[in-house]
Image: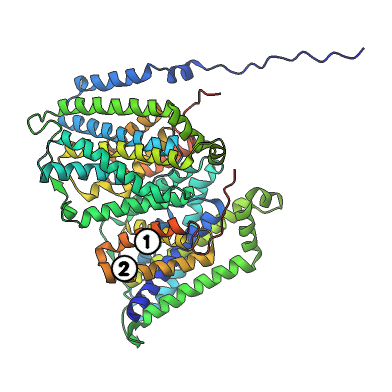
């Protein structure tokens, strides 16, 4: 009689801990929105409102770039270009043709879509690092063009851009709430897009482009779609930005801006919507918190970035896939 | 016309010198080292500090003094390159490539604003200025200093090429570029070779920094960014990771810019350079001398 095989022990993995389950909770987004809604009741000085509104615009940018980099895995180092295209389109239309700002939005969407196709069309067949340098070059091209054309006001930029509701309402708290609603909808939409059919195609392309191609995903079209979606988000963020500051100049759309948005995405956790929102808030608020360090501010920022990446290479709040 | 070609070749040799470091690092560990341009800036500043410390000695024999400073600066920036690799890049070997890219951006910030803390935000004027007698070669105005600087960069590039193609060290580098794991199994100390690669690349960037400081006369703490971008472009045009290709790419970019400035005006120069890069890559995605690289699945 042979010796019976030892009984196979059932594998007991560690189940999701309390913290993991909490972080994956669906209600967390509403909690975040509630925090955003209540914030002005705690602190409503014009400075705080302006910082918080900027943070929201930055969240919008980061969520847009997350579609390109996080979902689809395409490295874009010139994302500020779409931000600039959006801001300048609405700025030119509203100051030269005296359109209300809201009326410029459809045109901004069209123009940024075209910009997404123009840059994505010829370059998306390239390997990732070449794509990085091409997008970087594209970002610089847009900035230099804005710096040298007459219609964009040259180095001085455009000023006197009307507020979101015309010039009648200029209360920063009202503006903050308007931006909060727009950004919340944009974040929700981006999250839904990531969970949809095209979102799954994006993830597939990110994980293994060749396999995706072999399984019948039209990778080129899918990547272009990610680019166009990211461009629209960036452009709309540009409209909000132009309306907040009422003035724009090429100095706001440098490589630094693109790098900061990318940082927010990677720091938060690529592909994870809550993570990216958190990353954007951290990256936009950190320089304000470090303001006390004066000259050491950006130095400390760089060092902190290195430390954060070494400590958590996957980001602060990485995406955990549910499809297993 | 000859003047345009000469200017292009001169600027191109600077670009090539900086681009080599980019290309070497990329070839070996596939990292876009964003801090590389800032090492160029660091070289310019450490050269400035050394020349300042030498004081009165400088006036008597400027080119000799500049050469001594050049060697010392190459040592200093080379060591800084090793430190950056050790602190910011080595702990992340094997991490997702994007996180590595972000630490590179962080290192770039730290270098730029660290220099700003030490040296102050205002541009500095180099104590040694290289300008003087000019020759007339086929209708182009060529100064002796330009010739000297160009000869120096050619010497550095030839030395590098010999190092990579003829020595054991270079063979180890090429082996790691092909397959780091197999190189490790064959008894190559991968970490050490990568550190040396960073040293060489950073030293070349530092040399270019001192030369640019002596030639243009003005330096500031953000000067590294745009040259880093240009060097990157040059490396890509030539075929990134390929040493002769990178040199060629630098010269091509220099010529392009020279002619671009002449045809469309100085303010559109960078648009011209990057626009050409985009068109060029759409037609020939691997660069002039780059080989077709199959993506590892």
Give B82 or B241, whichever is nearer the viewer: B241
Q: Secondary structure at mark 2?
A: helix
Which quadrant is the C terminus of chain B positioned in? top right
Residue at the image point whose x is 20% and y is 26% from the top:
A178
Image: B269 above or below A252: below
The subunit letter for the residue under badge 2 reads B
Say if A302 sits above or below B187 in the image.
above
Q: Are marks 2 and 1 in contact (CB under 8 Å)?
A: yes
Residue at the left extreme? A168
Left or right: B171, with B247 as reference point: right
- The residue under label 2 is B260
B202 vs A253: above or below: below
Q: Secondary structure at mark 1?
A: helix
Q: Taking A269 as reference, is B94 above or below it?
A: below
Mark nearer the N terminus (2 vs 1): 2
Residue ID for mark 1: B276
| Residue A262 point in image, percent of width and height | 38, 41
State the separation of the CA atoms marked 2 and 1. 10 Å
């Amino acid at each position: 009689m042979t010796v019976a095989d030892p009984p196979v022990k059932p594998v007991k993995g560690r189940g999701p801990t309390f913290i993991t389950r909490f972080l994956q909770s669906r209600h967390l987004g509403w909690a975040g929105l509630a925090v955003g809604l209540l914030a002005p009741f705690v602190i409503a000085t014009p400075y705080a409102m302006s910082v918080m509104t900027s943070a929201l615009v930055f969240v919008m940018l980061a969520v847009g770039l997350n579609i390109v980099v996080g979902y689809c895995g395409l490295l874009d180092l010139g994302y500020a270009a779409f931000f600039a295209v959006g801001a300048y389109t609405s700025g030119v239309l509203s100051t030269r043709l005296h359109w209300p700002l809201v009326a410029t939005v459809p045109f901004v969407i069209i123009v940024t879509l075209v910009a997404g196709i123009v840059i994505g069309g010829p370059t998306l067949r390239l390997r990732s690092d070449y794509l990085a340098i091409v997008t970087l070059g594209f970002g610089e091209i847009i900035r230099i063009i804005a710096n040298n054309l007459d219609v964009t006001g040259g180095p001085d930029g455009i000023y006197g851009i009307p507020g979101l509701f015309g010039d009648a309402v200029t209360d920063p708290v009202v503006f903050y709430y308007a931006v909060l609603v727009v950004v919340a909808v944009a974040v929700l939409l981006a999250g839904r897009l990531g969970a949809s059919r095209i979102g799954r195609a994006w993830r597939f392309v990110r994980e293994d482009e060749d396999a995706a191609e072999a399984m019948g995903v039209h990778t080129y079209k899918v990547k272009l779609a990610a680019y166009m979606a990211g461009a629209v988000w960036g452009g709309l963020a540009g409209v909000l930005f132009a309306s907040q500051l009422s003035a724009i100049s090429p100095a706001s759309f440098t490589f630094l801006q693109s790098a900061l948005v990318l940082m927010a995405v990677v720091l938060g956790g690529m592909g994870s919507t809550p993570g990216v929102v958190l990353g954007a808030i951290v990256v936009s608020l950190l320089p304000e918190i470090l303001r006390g360090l004066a000259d050491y501010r950006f130095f400390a920022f760089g060092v902190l970035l290195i430390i954060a990446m070494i400590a958590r290479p996957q980001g602060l709040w990485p995406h955990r896939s549910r499809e297993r | 016309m000859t003047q345009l070609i000469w200017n292009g070749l001169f600027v191109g040799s600077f670009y090539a010198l900086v681009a080599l470091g980019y290309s070497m690092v990329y070839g070996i560990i596939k990292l876009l080292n964003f801090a590389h341009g800032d090492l160029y800036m660091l070289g310019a500043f450490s050269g400035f500090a050394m020349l300042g410390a030498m004081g009165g000695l400088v006036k008597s024999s400027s080119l000799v003094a500049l050469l001594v400073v050049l060697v010392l600066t190459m040592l200093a920036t080379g060591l800084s390159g090793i430190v950056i690799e050790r602190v910011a890049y080595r702990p992340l070997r094997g991490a997702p490539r994007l996180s590595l890219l972000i630490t590179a951006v962080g290192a770039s910030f730290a270098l730029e604003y660290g220099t700003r803390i030490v040296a102050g935000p205002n541009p500095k004027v180099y104590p040694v200025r290289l300008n003087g007698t000019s020759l007339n070669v086929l209708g182009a105005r060529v100064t002796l200093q330009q010739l000297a600087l160009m000869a120096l960069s050619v010497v550095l590039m030839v030395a590098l090429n010999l190092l990579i193609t003829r020595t054991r060290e270079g063979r180890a580098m090429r082996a790691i570029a092909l397959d780091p794991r197999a190189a490790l199994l064959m008894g190559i100390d991968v970490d050490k070779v990568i550190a040396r690669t960073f040293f060489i690349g950073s030293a070349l960037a530092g040399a270019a920094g001192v030369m640019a400081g002596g030639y243009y006369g003005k330096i500031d703490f953000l000067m590294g960014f745009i040259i880093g971008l240009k060097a990157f472009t040059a490396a890509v045009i030539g075929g990134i990771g390929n040493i002769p290709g990178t040199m060629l790419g630098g010269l091509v970019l220099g010529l392009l810019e020279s002619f671009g400035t002449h045809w469309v005006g100085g303010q559109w120069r960078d648009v011209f350079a990057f626009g050409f890069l985009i068109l060029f890559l759409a037609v020939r995605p691997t660069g002039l001398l780059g080989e077709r690289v199959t993506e590892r699945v």
